[in-house]
Every structure is written in C-alpha cells, then in structure tokens.
Image: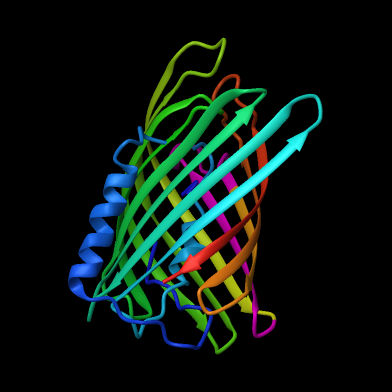
Amino acid sequence: MNNLPAIAEKETGTPLPRFGLKTAACCLVLLFLYIADLRPASAQVLNIESLRMDADTSKTWAGSLTFGFSASKNDSETIQLSNDATLVHLGQTHSYLLLSSLNLISIDDELVNNGHIHLRGTLGYRQRWSPELFTQLQYSRDWGLKRRALLGGGIRHNTFQKEHFRAGITTGLMFEHEVWHPEEAPRAEYNRLKSTTSLLTRGKLTESTSLYIVGYYQAEPERFLSPRLTANVELRFTVSRYVRFNAQFSTTYDYNPVPDVESWIYSFRNSFTIVF
C-alpha cells in the first residue's frame, strides 16, 4: 500500500527555507484543487515507505513535485507523462503526509490514466514505536480498476538508524473496497479486510546518491499465505539543492488476481523531482 510517515529525512544536509503557515495552507489548497478531479485510483501498491523517510525532522513543512516522461515505439507507440506531489507537516509530536499522483499514458493515440491520493498521520513520530492511521483512493483505467478505497491503521517500528543507513517495519490492518471492470470482463466488486506489512531500508551510497528498497506483504487473514507481494527499488541522484533525478523499478505479484488481470506486473520509471 500498492501501496506514510514517521516521516522521513531529506537527503541533503543543507537546510531549506521554512514555510510560513499561510504559504503552507496555500500549498494544501492548491494541491487539493489539483487532485479534486481524480476518481479513485492503481493496481500498484503505493511506494509510501520511501517517502516517509524523505522529510527533514528539523522542518515544520516540506514537500516535493516530481515530473516524468517516457516514449517508446515497438508494435505500438507509447507516450507517458506523470506528476507526483508530496506535502509533509511535522508537528511537535505528530506528523502528517499528503500524496497525490496522476499518470497519463497514450497508446496509439488512445489515452488511459491512473492516479491516487493518500493521507497518513503518525502519532509520536519521533518515538521508536509510532501508531499510524491512513486512508487512500485510487483508480487505474489501464488495468481496469475503477475504484479502490481503503482505510486502516497500524504501528511503525524504527528498527535501525545510523547516519547513512536506516531500516524500519510497519504492520497493521486495513479495510479495502475495490471495483474492477477490465475490458471484455464482467464488473467485479470486493470488500476485504487485509493485513499489511512493509519492510524498508535506505542507504546513502555517495554524497549525492541514495538507494531505497521497500517490500510489502498484504493478505486477507483467511488467505495469509496467498498474499499480494510488492517490491520497489529506487535510486535517487541529487543534482542540486532543489533538484533530484530518480530511477525506479516496481513489481507486484498477486496470488489471487482479479479475473482477466495479470498476476505479475512491473514497471520502470525515470523522473526528476523539485524539492522544497
């Protein structure tokens, strides 16, 4: 959860300018306006864990905008545009994370898209054990996911923290509502209670390069040994104080896929991020 934050530290040691309350509020309003048009969103588990480690705990507000573009031609011509937005608020005790994403894919002039919005709060985020609450909406027209909504909670353990390496585990429960309608397949609707567990590591390879590896295990209690498994591997290259280049590989294997949906899916993605 395809898939938020005790949140995260920035990769550069250089302090960024602080946001005033009015500026932060304006950012929130603009971000909500930007994603208000989204219907719920992707079959992919969201890579939230890499973002949770991405905010400097010395700041009250932090955020980033990510833009991606790719084009390919084989049997078909494919063009993809993507945009992600992240906004983090770190209080004295609790932290909050808002994520949104919109991807537009043109395949031989046929347009498909997917997107999501995710909100998470972490209570006592500075502690080794931190309770969390989260909610999410998704849709993915390319995979036939018309609507996916979830609400859940859990606890995060900051397992290991050193200057250049961090690791943690999060586990909890969520209620998931999905509506699927792939092409040439009947509509299907599911309401399920699931466990969700994620393991994450972050290592700084050089002064300008960081590696993130995140794994997810999500399963219904009565089918715990037939989960949805997801892995995300991401390299981040710091170009300057405010600009970062990202190379990401994501893959998901579902032991109980929806009819007419592949059990194994994967993607490669290159993008650049503006950090503020």
Please give the range of residues in magenta: 206-229
Asked which quadrant contains residue 98, the reply is: bottom left
Task: Tell whether 267 sits left or right of 30.
Answer: right
Foreground: 68 or 88? 68
Q: Nearer the viewer, residue 158 or 82?
A: 82
Of 46 and 33, the residue lying toward us:
33
Residue drawn at the location 36% of the way across and 36% of the way down: 38
Estimate the x, y position of residue 90 in percent, counting from the top left.
29, 75
Relative side of 91 to 147, left or right? left
* Residue 34 falls left or right of residue 116: left
Tell me the quadrant of the picture where the C terminus can be found. Answer: bottom left
Q: Residue at x 36, y 50 (%)?
A: 118
Q: Is residue 178 above or below residue 160?
A: above
Give the side of residue 258 with respect to residue 131, left or right.
Answer: right
The quadrant holding residue 149 is top left
- Assess whether residue 62 is covered by the magenta stretch: no
212 in the magenta segment: yes
Residue 67 at x, y = what percent? 54, 54
The quadrant where residue 227 appears: top right
- As drawn, which residue projects farthest toward the right? 74
Residue at image coords 47%, 64%: 51
- Image point (62%, 47%), residue name: 69
Q: Is residue 72 above or below residue 125?
A: above
Q: Is residue 225 visible?
A: no
